[in-house]
Image (cartoon, helix red, strand yellow):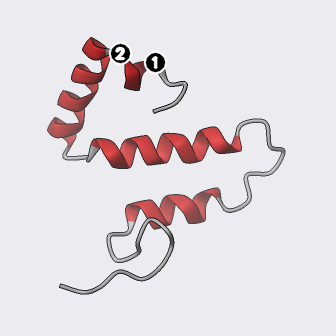
């Protein structure tokens, strides 16, 4: 992950992975949520951010916003 020391450093990343496992949160999801927030830094209005979070958190919607295939 670009620019996030916690996600890049070995020991810190290992600790983060452990906490994600304990919380049953995929680390990729956490990285995507943080990246979505970083993209909004400095913007006056965070238009679309909650929509992006909804996309990331809803398993029926793909990361690109398209509807996923059912099982």
Q: Position of residue 38 (x, y in %)?
A: 62, 38
Quadrant assignment for the C terminus: bottom left
Relative placement, left or right, of 63 versus 17 is right
Q: Position of residue 52 (x, y in %)?
A: 55, 61
Image vertical order of residue 38 relative to residue 53, above or below:
above
Return the residue at label 1: 5
Quadrant assignment for the N terminus: top left
Relative placement, left or right, of 51 versus 57 is right
Check if mark 1's residue and mark 2's residue have beta carbons within 8 Å. Answer: yes
- Between the C-alphas of marks 1 and 2, the distance is 6 Å
Q: Nearer the viewer, residue 39 or 19?
A: 39
Image vertical order of residue 45 relative to residue 65, above or below:
above
Give the residue at x 74% y 59%.
Answer: 47
Q: Position of residue 7 (x, y in %)?
A: 39, 26
Return the residue at label 2: 9
Crowd around label 1: few <14 · some 14–19 · many ≥20 (10 Å): few
């Amino acid at each position: 992950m670009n620019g996030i020391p916690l996600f890049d450093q070995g020991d810190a990343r290992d600790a983060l992975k452990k906490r994600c496992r304990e919380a049953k949160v995929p680390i990729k999801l956490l990285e995507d949520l943080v990246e979505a927030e970083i993209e909004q830094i400095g913007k006056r209005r965070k238009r679309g951010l909650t929509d992006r979070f909804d996309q990331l958190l809803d398993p029926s919607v793909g990361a690109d916003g398209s509807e996923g295939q059912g099982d």
